[in-house]
Image: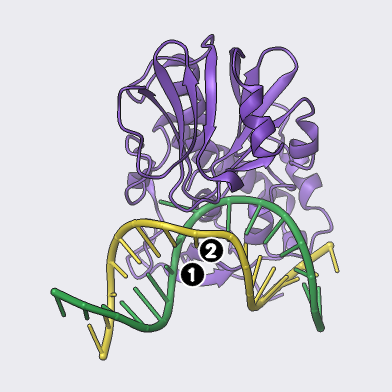
Chain colours: A purple, B yellow, C green
Amino acid sequence: MPELPEVETIARALRQGGRGARPIVGARVRAARVLWPRTVAMPDVAAFEAHWPGRVITGIARRGKFLRLEVDAAWQALVHLRMSGDLLVQPATAPLPRHTRLYLELDDGRRLIFDDPRKFGRWWLTTDPQTVLGHLGPEPLDPAFTPERLAQRLRGRRARLKALLLDQTVLAGVGNIYADEALHRAGLHPLRRAHTLTHDEITALWHALRQVLQEGLALNGASIDWMYRGGAFQNQFRVYGRSGQVCYTCGERIQRVRVAQRSTHFCPRCQPLPSE
DNA sequence: CCTGAAACCTGTCTGC
DNA sequence: TGCAGACAGGTTTCAG
């Protein structure tokens, strides 16, 4: 679930307060506890737990779908929520959520809790974040991300458009939901080969990507199933999860196909596939 | 370079 | 009601 807008929403809440809690920037960590060892990708669990006592969280940032907790000057904790991870701040007196995999005990009487039912989420603690983040493509909402930059990333690629939008080395932060929504708004079929796009189509895709991500951000992300309550972008879906229902634009039925092992939703009339 | 499959996991929903 | 099976937002690794 968590894609760029959801991760950014969580980062903002940790930085500025929100989701029922005050900011954690400036808080000193008393101790770290790892309840599911595989959650820690780097270093080993003993070194991870030993690192935290006395450290201060000095900043919160986001890169792609990664959260970055700046810990004193030299160290950063990188957190990837994958499918079901969430970060919560609760009083130490509150019972831990059912799927807590790791938590930091803060010296102001609160805890930063990593809750993750499916156990796919990961934490890295490192002085060199580039070893983890170095492969990521550009940030789609960065002012430096222009239609030309997008064209550059897609140039010469014969893969399906949908597969490339999900590839974090091409573009950082887009996942299944925002990819489908962007393709619909751009009028592009998910199976189009990237190198067949015209300049105008790339510009339309650029606009659509920025539009859906910004709209998602403005609505605090999308809340699906039981996760990430508080977001409202799910009410703006035009294709995602709407297979069999009518397209708001043209009245055609939304179709669902499998692309790159992911369910993909599109309108066959608004997003035609030209003969290749 | 590209595609597909499998693996990592648990919870929820559907259909028999 | 019970249970097997399918499916879910992500990423990595491997085979062809």
**Relative to B16, is A169 on the left or the right?**
right
Residue at mark 1: chain: A
Image mark for residue A268: 1
- Residue A234 position, x and y percent, is 36, 46
User: Which amino acid type is marked by label 2?
Assistant: Gln
Q: Which element type, helix, strand or loop, lies under badge 1?
A: loop
Q: Is residue A208 visible?
A: yes
On screen, residue A126 above or below A224:
above
The answer to whether the residue labelled 1 contacts the one labelled 2, judged by CB atoms less than 8 Å apart, is yes
Q: Nearer the viewer, residue A230 or A205?
A: A230
Residue at the image point whose x is 54% and y is 11% from the top:
A28
Residue at the image point whose x is 50% and y is 43% from the top:
A2
- The CA distance from mark 1 to mark 2 is 5 Å
Q: Nearer the viewer, residue A106 or A227?
A: A106
* Image quadrant containing the C terminus of chain A: bottom right
Image mark for residue A271: 2
Residue at the image point whose x is 31% and y is 32% from the top:
A95
Residue at mark 2: chain: A
- Residue A21 position, x and y percent, is 36, 19
User: Which amino acid type is marked by label 1?
Assistant: Pro
The quarter of the picture where residue A29 lies is top right
Local packing at callout 2 (Cα closer than 10 Å; few below 14, some 14-19, many 20+) is some
Residue at the image point whose x is 65% and y is 28% from the top:
A77
**Relative to A50, is A111 on the left or the right?**
left
